[in-house]
Image (tube, helix red, strand yellow):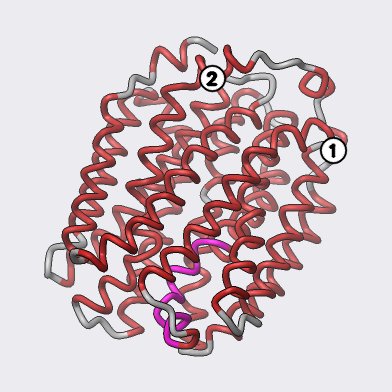
Amino acid sequence: MWKIVFPGLAMIAVTYALARLSFGLFLPDISNSLELSESDSGLVGSTAYLSYSIALLVSAALIKKLGQHKVIVIAGLTAVLGLSGIASAQSYLHLVISMFIAGIGSGLASPALSQAAQSALSKQELDQGNTWINSGTSFGVILTGPIVLLFAEHWRLSYIFFAIIAIGVLYWNYYSIPSRYDQKQAMDQKMNWLSVMNKSKFLLLASLISGISSSIYWTFSRSYITVEYNMTTNESVVFWIIMGVAGIVGGAAGGFIQKLGLAWSYRLLLFLLFISIVLLTVPLNWTHYFSAALFGSSYIFLTGLFIVWATRIFSVLPALGVSLSFLALGIGQALGSFFAGRLIEMTSYPFSFILFAGIGLIGLLFPTEKAADSC
């Protein structure tokens, strides 16, 4: 199992944490260098989510045509190009284009890796394998923290280093993920889109709402604690590292879901996500760090749960279910990031974070067990 999990985990770390989510960590320094407003920053962040969503939209078709191995390679290449572009960005437009390219890899990697896991792992290993691969986001988040401390305000050097890491991970996946596991049954299967959407409707709604609610935290949490609470760079980086370390427990989501059940796991995680966002508005240092720990763990757990939910609905072509779920998540994050920046400018950080936390609770209205039993 680990021959698939380790390189897959590393690819998720690169495409999600380094190429897309690290923007929130470096946002204060990037904004100062390129003179970006809050609205500009929100638009740049939403651009990466937009390309992520587009990639998810076409990922299942690409996997059926090219196979998961080639799609994983393409994901790695876009991460390398995007990170290199961010490192050399000299203008707002240059940054937007680079972020767009960087976001593509994450949209291709998750579906392709879920298909590789479905083909290579046993039924007993599948849930745990998928959720451990998904936890790569946390390992990437942990990596970005010390780099910020080492390079301080030299964010360009950080992104150059990220690009070098991405090249190494691309090489690792190229030689480690076996292409022979492409499923011919999945390749030849014709999809009834009406049936597909009907089976996955609650999964898609849950993913969309979770994406909207979590977007403000990924994009603006570090800006919030530095602007509102005057946290130093080191303190805010520790905040970010705690978020990543806590997310590692998300790798255990597969076993957790099997014991507690999909429905109860989903509702518990959604409520914890709500609490984590609200806690950031409490003006006490310990609550900010606790918020980071709670958000990191609940978010990775929740996205791992979406992968498990999707693979149970679409047992033959899990890449399709993961693509649709993460597409809805990405659309929610793109919309959320864009409107969060504008809302913060119009109102305040605390009001905006509490509002976005409340939006997440809408997800409690969606059933899960019925959808999962239909697979």
Of residues 11 and 157, which is closer to you in this image? 157
Question: Which region is colored magenta?
Answer: 20-32
| In-front residue for pair 11/210 | 210
Residue 172 lies, in percent from the top left, at 78, 58
Q: Which amino acid does label 1 sit on?
A: Leu
Provide the residue designation for mark 1.
Answer: 66
Residue 66, by quadrant, is: top right
Q: Which residue lies most toward the right here?
A: 180
Vertical placement of residue 345 versus 369, above or below: below
Front residue of this view, candidates 80 and 242: 80
| Residue type, label 2 | Met
- Is 293 above or below relative to 311? below
Q: Where is residue 7 in the image (x, y as percent from the top left)?
A: 70, 53
The residue under the point 53% across, 89% down is 154
Q: In which quarter of the image is residue 189?
A: top right
Is the stretch drawn in magenta largely helix, strand or loop?
A: helix
Residue 197: assigned label: 2
Residue drawn at x 52%, y 70% as measured from the top left: 143
Is 127 one of the magenta-colored residues?
no
Sequence-first disc among 2 and 1: 1
Q: In this view, does 272 lie to the left or right of 262?
A: left
**Is residue 183 toward the left or the right of residue 14 in the image?**
right
Local crowd size for mark 1, using a 10 Å CA cut-off: few (<14), some (14–19), many (≥20): some
Quarter of the image for residue 348 reads bottom left
Q: In which quarter of the image is the N terminus?
A: top right
